Image (tube, helix red, strand yellow):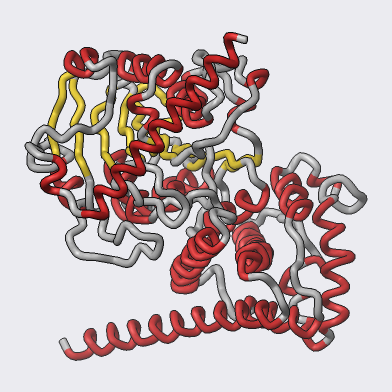
Amino acid sequence: MAEPKATHGSGDETAGRRRQEVQLAVKNACDQLNSDGVAPRDYAEQLAWLFFLKAFDEAETRREREAALDGRPYTRRLEGDFRFANWSRTIDRPDEMLEFVDAKLWHHLKSFGQRDGTKQFADDPVAGLFRRIFSTVRNHSRRGASFARVVQQVNRLHFSDETDVIVLSEIYEDLLKRVASDSAGYAGEFYTQRHIIRAMVEVVRPRIGDRVYDPCFGTAGFLTESAEYIRRHCSARGGGDLGTLDKRTFFGVEHKPLTYLLGLMNMLLHRIDGADLAQANTLELHTPDVNETHRYDVILSNPPYGGKLARELQTNFTVRSSATEILFLQHIMANLKTGGRAAVIVPEGVLFRGGPAARVRQRLLTEFDVHTVLSLPAGCFLPYTGVKTDVLFFNRRQDGKGTESIWFYELSNDGFELKPARRPIDGSQIGDFLAGWPRRSEGENSWRVSIADVAKQGFDLSARNPNRTNDYQHRNALELVQSIKVKEERILELLGELEELLEVGE
């Protein structure tokens, strides 16, 4: 027994040392960027394109070796001086390296597939990917010596090493979170907290063979967590399953170029390099009549809200509304496959407002099984927004039936303070929610409501806990303040709705 224990300990020590080395390399790179005057919010972008090129180069090497073993020819997309492994070795000539990257490499990637020497890849999706990425991001390093030191740190990372990838994904997501916090959502508006994502994924339970979709994937939190869930629960070991997971499982659309790159990089760090991710405006692409074969088994999303879409761009929506959250909800409904499962975060106004919101809710309850509403505490998405939000869980049933009853869970403690710093606290109710969900257990924080009773309330889905005899008696000062803020936000939403109706009438 002693020998295996020693071996295991040695393995743990090796992994621990490697974790520290990876953390140190990323820290050194960020410190160097800082010393070169790069703004903290630009760290993620700078590291993203460097990580991308290094990860891509390693993936190409892996494919080249696999092809050689099978006796097949393989042509690398980036060859010669344009390979990361080649130009990154020239750190002893830093000024030349920086000049090469800014002048030659960038031009090569921005026109990849369209110029001599790369036209054979014109129909390769990678060509379009290169052009999109390197037409929108930039090299923030201005001094050769500083850039060389950053590249030197990136070269210490190995994307083919599982330990490196796990640690890098943790560090990178933390960096994205901090960047978003420091710049009011710059890296991915309203960054969705990982524990909320994980709870949503636990309910919809994606599996091998599912098509998983996020119509506004941001930094790819829902897609990467779904990938990890499938690996943990579905025993994807065979080559066929792994190929399905990599190339036929994940789909998404993201409008903002930088956010698209950050999400793409996050997917690569979670060992998914074949996802079908598009850079486009989802709402402009929307169609209400989606063929069943093009729909998705699982849809997970936190759509942007508070935005407006021009009236002339709403013609493809059954219920027109300038509120983006109403349009995204319709898009998700249209794209959910028969037998599919969805989990969507919406601002609470979607659950009680009249007009377009009420019509969409009625359709949702009639055509889908809205089995669960998870009421999140106001402040759950601080420091980005204090708007009260809820998670709608619904399925498109095989028998075509709509909602029969809804299980509500009122979450007042998600394990973090409801303040901008969001420090961890004891008493998280997420575990209780997940434990009660399979049987839809009723308790102090959970209850069921029939569709008949919901209809009597004008299809209002707001969570009103019947177990609270005196709502204010059981709430602390912070909750009361947040409740007042929510009511003020409701008033503003109603005024916005009234304004929209007046505009239509003019």
- Image quadrant containing the C terminus: top right
Relative to the observer, which residue lies in front, 145 or 248?
145
Residue 292 vertical placement versus 51 (above, below): above
Residue located farthest toward the top when viewing the structure as drawn: 505
Q: Which residue occupies 49% across, 20% down?
A: 498
Residue 123, image x and y in percent?
A: 76, 39
Residue 503, image x and y in percent?
A: 59, 16
- Image quadrant containing the N terminus: bottom left
Q: Which residue occupies 54% across, 68% down?
A: 160
**Rendered image quadrant of residue 72:** bottom right
Q: Which residue occupies 24% across, 28% down?
A: 371
Relative to the observer, which residue lies in front, 123 or 18?
18
- Left or right, 370 with respect to 78, comes to left
- Left or right, 497 with respect to 112, comes to left
Relative to the observer, which residue lies in front, 65 or 196?
196
Q: Which residue occupies 61% across, 82% down?
A: 31
**Rendered image quadrant of residue 42:** bottom right
